[in-house]
Image (tube, helix red, strand yellow):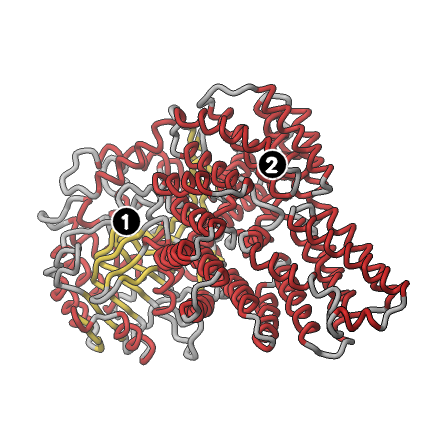
Amino acid sequence: MIFSNSPLLSWFRSHKKFVSWLLLMVFTMTGCLVLSPNRVVRATMKPSQYESSNLVAGLVEKSSLLYQGENYSAAIEILQQALSEYELQRDELRQAMVLSNIALAYQQLGEWEQVSIFIERSLGKLENIEPSREQKLILAQTLDIQGKLQLVQGDANLAAKTWQQATEVYQEIGQPEGVIRTRLNQAQALQASGYYRRSVKILQQLETSLTDLPDSITTAVGFRSLGNALLLVGDTDKARTALETSLAIAKRLNSIPDISSALFSLGNLEKSQLSYEQAKGYYQEVARISGDPSQKIKAQLNHLTVLRKNQEFDAIPPLLREIDSLITELSLNHEAIYAQINYAQNLIKLREAQSISLSKSQIKSFSQNIVKEAQQLSDQPAEAYALINLGRFYELDNQLGSAEEVTQEAGIIAQNINARDISYQAQWQLGRLLAAQEQDERAISSYRQAVATIQSLRSDLVAINSETQFNFTENIEPIYREYVSLLLKYPDSSENNLLAAREALDSLQLAELENFFNATCLDAQPVVIDEITDRDDPSAAIIYPIVLEDRFEIILKLPQEKLRHYTVPIKNPQTVEPTLQRLSQSLTQRNSNETLALSQQVYQWLIEPAQKDLARSNIKTLVFVLDSPLRNIPMSVLHDGQQYLIEKYAIALAPGLQLVNPRPIAQQQLTALTAGLTEARGDFPPLKYVENELSTVQSQIPRTELLLNDSFTTNDLQAKIAGVPFPVVHLATHGQFSSQAENTFILTWDDRINVNQLNSLLSNRDLEREEAIELLVLSACETLTGDKRAALGLAGVAVRAGARSTLATLWRVNDEASALMMGQFYQELGNQANSITKAEALRQAQLTLLRNPRFNRPHFWSSYVLVGNWL
C-alpha cells in the first residue's frame, strides 16, 4: 500500500491542476506585483536594480519549472535564493509570496514542520502589508496551505475554519477556482470530523455552482474534484455522476489531459467498489490516450493492482513488460519515485503470493535503487517508503537481520519528519520481524507503538483518497490481529496483556466502523460495559471471541471479577471460514439439515471452554463483542448438543467496549413511531403481514403514530421524528446490510435511505432536543448475500442511528412469524410487572417461535439480534 506522507497530501496531489495554476499565477506576478506594469517600474530603476530584478525573476521562473517537474527540493533551494534577494530589496509582499510557495513545495514533500515554519513567516509578513488584490491572493493561498497543515495535525475543525477564511478571500477577489478548491477542502475537513451533513451540504452547493458555469477547464477539474470528494464521503452514485460530467466537459473541450484524469478517477471509483472489469477498462483507456508518461504509468500501476487483487495472473506478465518500459522513460522526480515505490510493492506482493515467476535479484536491485534515487531527491518520505519495501523483500527472503536494519532506518526517518502514517507501517513491520525472531517483548512494544500511531491518525485514515490503494483489511486489520495474537500467546497471559488485547480489539472495531463510514464516529461520552456488569446488571457476562490464524481466543468478563482467558487450538485452520459461512448460509434456508451440526461446532469453539465459569456465576445474559468473521452468525443459534444458547441465556451484541448512556427503557408513557410497507416497491416484494405487525405494536404501545405505504416517505419520516421525540421507532420495511455504507439502506415508499442518511434522519446529536431513540427496530432487513462482512452494516446502522438499542433481522424471514414475534416482544417489554431487560424480552419472544411447531426451525427465530444497550 503506497500513499504519500499524508492521506491529505494524496488528496492535495489529486487536485494538482488547481495548485499549479495558482502557483504559476503568483509567480508570473513577479515583475509587476502590486506596483505598476513592469515597464513603468523599470523606468524608475537604477541599472543595479534592473540586474537584481532580472536575477530574481529568473530564479522564480526556474523554481516554477522545477516545481512543475516535481523536483521540489531543488525548487526550494532556488526559492530560498529568491527570498534572499527580496529581503535585500525589502520587498515584504514578494517575500510573503516566496515563503508561501516554499511552504507549498515542502507540503508536496510532506515535511509538515517546515510547512508550519514558512506558513507562519508568510502570514506574519502579510499582516503588516496594506491589503490589495495581490496581497489577498497570497493570503488566500497561504491560508489554504495552513488548512491542510491543520488537518494533517488532526485539528479538522480548525482546518475547516481556516478554509472558510480562504474561501471568503477568494470570493472577495473573484477567484472561482480558489473558491472551489477551498470549499472542497472544507467539506473534506468536516467529513473527517464526522460532520457528514455539513460536508454534504457544501458539496451540494458546489455542484450547483459548477452547473451554472460554462464549459471550461476549471469546471472539468471542479466536477472531477467534486466527484473525488463525494467518493470520499461514500456517495458513490453522485460521485460517478460528477466524474462523468467532468469527462463529458473534457471531451467537449477536447482536453486530453482532463479526459485522462476523469477516466482515471472513474477507474478508482470502480476499483473502490471492487468492480474490477470496469476499473480495468478505464485504466486501459487512460494508458491508451494519455500523452503524459506520469498519468500513463499511474493507470498501468492501478491496472496491475486490479489484476493482482482479482487474481488474473495470466494477464500480468504482458502488463509488467509495458510498465518496465514506461518506468525507464520517467524523469527522476517526485511523481516518478512514487511510481517506482508502487511498482516495487506490487512486485513484492506478487512474489509473496508466488503467483508468477519473478527474478528475486532484479526486485532486490530495483528496490535498492529506489532508496538511492529518493536520497538524490532529498525526498525523505519516499526514502522511508522505499526502505520499508526493501525491508519487506528481505523479510520474505528470510534475511531478518537486514530487514530489521532497514526497517528501523525507515522508522527513524518517519519519526524525524513526523510522518505518522509511515511510522505505523515501519512499527508494524518491525514488530513482525521481532516476533519472527521470538523477541516477543520487543515485538509487543513495536506493535503497541503501531496501534497507538494508528489511533492518532483516526481522522486522517478515514480521509484517504481511493487513489492511494489503501485497503483496511490489508493494511490496518492485520496489525491488530497480530498484536492480539502476541499478547495472548501464552495460556497464563497477564491481566495487563488481557486488558491490552481487549482494548486493541475495541480499537479495531472502532477503526473498522470509521473505515465503513469514511468518518470518525462515537463522539458521545460512552460508558465502559464492564461498569454495567459490575454495577447495573450482575447477571450479565461479556464474551470477546477472537478468530486468529491458528486458534480461537476467548476473553470473558464476569461481574466483579478479573478477565478470564481461554485458548481453543484449531486443528485445521482452513475449515474455520467455510464452517462459519456454511452456518450463516444454512440459516437463510427454512429446512437446512446442516444447521444443527454446524452450530454445535461453533458452540464448541466459542462457548464450551467458558461454560463452567458461566454456570458458577449464575449468568443469565451473554453480551458478545464479536470479531468480524463471526458477525453474520446469530449467537442464539449455537447448540450445546441438548439445547440452543437462547434457551439458557438472553443474548445481545455490543459494537465495542463502550455504550452510550445505557439505561433500561422507561415504562411510563412509552410512545412509538411505526412505519412500514405492505405493497411491492420496485424489485422488492410485498410484505402482506406488516400491517398486522404494526397493529400489534400499537396494541402494546397505545401512544403510537403510524406511517404506512404512501405516507411512509423519507420526508414524512424525518418530519415526524423531528417534531416529537419517540423512544421507540419501529420500521417494518425492506432493508439491506452490507460491508459498504452505500449498499446499507432501508426502503421507504419513495426512496432508499442509506446508513449515512439515516444518521441525518434519526440521530439527535445535532438537534436542539436531547432525547435519544431508546429502541430502533428494523424488522424486515437482511444481510447482503455473499458479503462475508455484511453484518458490519448492522453495526453501522446501530451506531449511526443514534439509538441506544437496535433490534434487527440478519435475513428476511416469514413476515407472519415476524408479526408474531414482534407482538410477543412488545408484550414482554411493556409488562411493567415483569420489568425485564430488552435482551430478555427478545429471548422470550424468540422462545415463543421456537415452541411454535410452524416456526421452530432456527431460520424463523434466530434472525433477530439486539445491538447496543441490553438493559
Q: Amino acid at mark 1?
A: Thr
**Residue at coordinates 64% horizontally, 35% vertically from top-left?**
386
Secondary structure beneath disc 1? Answer: strand
Q: Amino acid at mark 2?
A: Leu
**Residue at coordinates 43% horizontally, 64% vertically from top-left?**
215
Secondary structure beneath disc 2? Answer: loop
When asked about the image quadrant of residue 741, the answer is: bottom left
Please tell me which residue lies in front, 800 or 356: 356
Q: Is residue 492 visible?
A: no
When asked about the image quadrant of residue 744, the answer is: bottom left
Check the image and report above or below for 764 versus 793: below
- What is the crowding at mark 1: few (fewer than 14 residues within 10 Å), some, or many (at least 20)? many
Q: Earlier in the sequence, mark 1 or mark 2?
A: 2
Distance, label 1 to label 2, CA atoms, is 47 Å
Q: Is residue 223 left or right of residue 838?
A: right
Check the image and report above or below for 165 versus 805: below
Please tell me which residue lies in front, 651 or 374: 374
Q: Is residue 427 left or right of residue 788?
A: right
Q: Is residue 591 visible?
A: yes
Please tell me which residue lies in front, 461 or 835: 461
Indicate the quadrant containing the C terminus: top left, top right, bottom left or bottom right. Answer: bottom left
Q: Which mark is residue 386?
A: none
**Residue at coordinates 44% horizontally, 39% vertically from top-left?**
288
Residue 94 in the image, given as x and y percentages of width and height: 77, 66
Residue 587 in the image, given as x and y percentages of width and height: 22, 42
| Label 1 sits on residue | 783
Q: Is residue 313 left or right of residue 337?
A: left
Q: Is residue 688 left or right of residue 578?
A: left
Q: Which mark is residue 330?
A: 2
